[in-house]
Amino acid sequence: MLNYIMRRAVAMPFILLGIVTLAFLLTTITKGDPLTAIVSERQMNNPEIVAAAKARWGLDRSLPERYVIYVANLVTGDMGTSFVTRRPVSRDIAARLPATLELVIAAMAIGSTTGILLGLLAAYYRDSVIDQTARLFSLFGSSVPIFWLGLALLFVFSVHYHLLPGPGRLDARLTPPPSLTGFMVVDTLLAGNPAAFKDALLHLILPSLVLGWTVAGSISRIVRANMLEIMEREFILTARAKGAGELRVVFRHALRNILVPVLTVLGYTFAYLITGAVLTEAVFGWPGIGSYAVIAARSLDFPAIIGVTIVGGMMFLITNLLTDIAYVFANPRVRLN
Amino acid sequence: MAMAIIRPKTMRRRLPSWVSPSFVIGGAVVLFWLFATLFPHWLSAFSPLDLAGRRLQPPSPDHLLGTDALGRDVFARTVYGARQSLPIAVLVVISAVLIGTAAGAIAGYRGGFVGAAIMRLVDITLSFPAILLAMAVAASLGPGLGNAAIAMVVVWWPIYARLVRAQVLEVREREHVEAAVAAGASDFRILTKHILPLCWTPVLISATMDLGQVILLGASLSFIGLGARPPTPEWGAMISDGTVYFYNWWIAFGAGMAILTIVLGFNFIGDGLRDYFDPRSSK
Amino acid sequence: MSVGISGYFAGHGRRWKGLLAATAFVALTLSFGAASAKTLVIARDMDVNSLDIHRSWCETCIIYNEAVYEGLLTLDANNKFVPVIAESWQASDDLTTFTFKLNPKATFSDGSKVEAKDVKWSWERLKNIKSNGSGFADTIDTVESPDAETVVVKTKGPNSEFLNIISATFFGIINSDVAQAQGKAIAGTEAAQSDASEGWFMAHSAGSGPFVFESYEPGAELRLKRNEKYWREPAKVDEVVMRQVADSVAQAQLLQSGQIDVAMQVDAETAKTLTSPDVKVESVPSFNFIYVAMAPGAVENPFPMTPEIREAISIAIDRKALREFTVGEGNGELISVPFPLHFPGADGHAIPEYNPEKAKELLAKAGKGDGFTLSATFPKLNVYGVDLSIMMQKIQQDLAKINVTLDLKPVEMSAWREKISTDHIPFTVGYYSPDFYGTSQFVQTFGLAEGTLWFKRGGAERDPSYLIPENLTLMAQALKSKPEEAEKVWFKIGENIKNANVVIPIMSPNLLLTYSSKVHGMRNSAICILPLYEVSLDD
């Protein structure tokens, strides 16, 4: 197993190269004018300006040439300059990644807590109303179009009842705190600004709830299935026979024993959330890398498209690898093999 | 679902094991939408494309879900929307299953360089955030449901390739396969006669659930403008229209409910199938 | 400002609304404090492509350009010239030599004097950098600075619109010493290849305007602060914050709740929800317009689109109903020539009458009474508060009545641009807003003659029948004439374009100014959209 993980780790750079290549190829089948974000409409008629723009952004070179230059630069960490923001893509991504992570972590917290609790309840009160309700709740989360749910919640809680703020991370009137961690909730605290902290927290509620809901289902399902299996095992029966309290049985004995599958599903869920945040970011005006990718795709901002794809793919790969490693360490039997 | 909750356990025991309540409910919902796909005009008197009344009218007995920005009946558009989503989802899943099964079978049975190459391609494709990959492909090919469908096949086939490969690897070791190999059967025959027939259960369960997921992704693509072209009544596009006329909530309501119910329906059926084929997984 | 694209980013394409709302609000990197200062908060769907005035071509950019870099002269609310850095100016009789006297009091934000050499350097850089604004400087032959307070410009030919052109914000004056020393900016003929100062301009400013650059975070916010050394009366607010809020509903909500002072892109439908007594909604005529167009040379045309067929399609569009469906009555003017309202030669053209019966007759005469299908690729956007998709679907319903089927294909702007310049598009929709107050730019775009944008877009290489070469001679004549005569010539060109029915202007949507009642001095400017210098804020 360790061997397998080593092999995976070694294969990663090659898979990354594959991602870069595929992203590059995708940009070539695009039937769009790459100068859209660079040369204004009326100046498209001016050959000098068009030629100068192409030369400046390297669009006068052939694709293989651009590919080689890009990969060579990438090795040094240079992902090129965005057509749209005119800043290094790496800097743009670094500025936006914390927003996505903040959302994903919050969604992860909500999704996993809800999922695990629901799974436990459902398994414990198997086939009861609670079990069925939990199942329906999870199924709803994985069936509802996230963009519609987000809009509906915004309409109800923000527009109609004014209970929660609208899109974004912070009230427009509040001065954003200095970016130390990039996490608005943490930065407002560090800046010692309770009002801003409260506002940032309120902004985080709806998007993370919507996103968390979509994954609570799969988590609760795994927890339930594993719990059902464990609860019939001998040691649980023994613990019960010895007169251990029910709570103690569930949390001490059973839960500990299903840690491995739960950990695994949490890892994959995290990887899924990183990418699944795109639509949520879209609906809630969340300035993360998902929305960055969408803007890039719309304006054919090649450096940004490829950059964000690489970073997204890399995070996905690393999370999965870490999950596998955690799996090995949490499960001694696998390690011995 | 409410029925399932109050139904006594003893009664459920007497029913054939595949008739789980979730299967029945899911089936009923899907049948309803199938009906809407085939006979939308029986459900709505209005055309989904023509002016049906004043624009932006709230729901009323005449227009159950009101009218949209162009004065079209939202209920009619919702019902006719099934004609877009359902057939495309079926087509996408079947294509993805066929391509994925072929690729996975070859990778699992033959292995070697070809198998490794296929699986690396699978790894790479699966390393792309699904929605981003679909967006990139759909944006490159241009708008339209057909291109969105292609994009979704590109996203989905590797999932089946992985699933089938794992199955093939397991089944390959079984005795009857070894017997067939010893008997000198051709690779193709061994695969199609002895291995694949034993692999189809997880594929079927997965495919049923994926029908719902494909509808969701398709609607997402339309929502961000990469799917259906106007004036096609498509659910994702209708929700997108609803965001423009944010205060006229009814424009998006029907489409949202439609997606929710149909995806729930497929999930229920998938659940029922899983209960039937693999009772251990949920009990 | 420059046409399509800026609108593209600014225009919060509704399909994408949510997605671009992505970049709403936000913001980082700013410190706390200065609570009592007067801060004007503006919500915009920001489209900043560059803060280097010579490379910029977006709506947000020109608001910024005008506030930070001053030109020699500018336009007042009545589109009349008012002096800024130039104290006086003079044109030679043949309209080829223009002499400016600079105001000796004018200083840059670092306190140094604005001199003729700065004007020369700025305009030469604009010309040589071969970027978006450079096209406007093409008319310049030489810029000389005989002494520190005199600038003499020679144009390549007579140009009655030269003063209008240089009132565009791209002609703002940069502190050349600072830009060269700190930003390593280059103005010489090698500028197109060697100038790498854009990054510096996106983090600094070096102008003489009432505001200076404070900070910029792409997709989040742009902050300007008052130029404390401003040489004229200081700006009325201490700080201006333009915040990214992509979507109309969100902008309206923020305004309603008092979180922002000005919302710049609230559409008519959403404006109806602005009921707070503290919010003002003003619908003012704009200089933007929307047109539909048929390329006679489009590859996908089923057969040649003759003038009769084009006329039939034009009169089959119910323009009044279209306005009602898109912006609502009273929120836009119908137009028939591709010049902004009240620009020279723009007024007095009749609006084509809606007449489906006559349209059918025309089609029958052309032998196409049974109808046909036109492919209609168009950018999927919301521009000037008009959802182009809704607009095209309404036209689709109209044309169905004369048996013409529109096959609608909404696409990304990039795909649209590629398509319209290669295969051209049988039926599409476009939009335009002026870069400066003058009509020549519209003839260069819509003139339907060689060298104009619609020479290419209409597909003249496949079907040149729609061209009107006369427009070029007329334009040369207008550029040689005094304003009153020129106006007549521009009018004639407008009629020519209108009668060709290739570019069919539809309407000029009103601009909705929505702002808090604490804000004063809001107006729509033809050259800089919102002159920040004139805006003030009550306590």
Image (tube, helix red, strand yellow):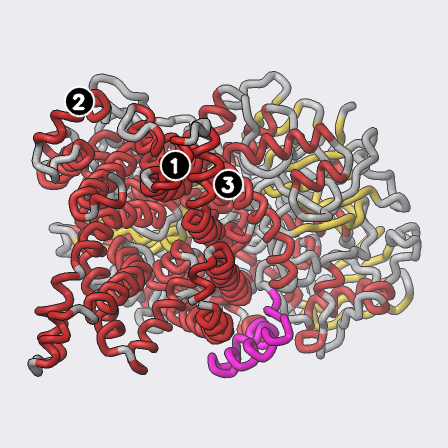
A211 falls in the magenta region: no
Depth check, mark 1 against mark 3: the one in front is: 1
Alpha carbons under labels 1 and 3: distance apart: 37 Å
Q: Is residue C307 left or right of residue A94?
A: left
Q: Which percent across, then down, holds residue A145? A: 35, 39
Q: Quadrant of residue A133?
A: top left
Q: Position of residue A289 (x, y in %)?
A: 54, 53
* Residues flagged by tags 1 and 3 on a common chain: yes
The kind of residue on which mark 2 rests is Pro
Looking at this view, name the residue that lies furthest to the front: A242
Q: CA distance from mark 2 to mark 1?
A: 31 Å
Badge 1: few (under 14), some or many (20 or more) residues near its Cα, within 10 Å? few
Residue B245 showing in the rendered view: no
Q: Pointer 2 indicates a residue of which chain? A: B
Q: Residue at x 28, y 54 (%)?
A: B144
From the viewer's perspective, tell me whether residue C501 is left or right of residue A291: left
Give the residue at mark 1: A238
- Between A38 and C522, the one lying in front of the other is A38
Question: Looking at numbered disc 1 in the image, what kind of residue is underneath it?
Answer: Thr
Name the residue rendered at 63%, 67% in the picture. C131
User: What span is in magenta?
Assistant: A53-81
Tag 2, which secondary structure? loop
Question: What residue would you read off at disc 3?
Answer: A107
| Mark 1 element type | helix
**Which residue bears the numbered disc 2?**
B8
Is the same chain shared between marks 2 and 3? Answer: no
Q: Disc 3: which chain?
A: A
Residue C61 badge? none
State which chain disc 1 sits on.
A
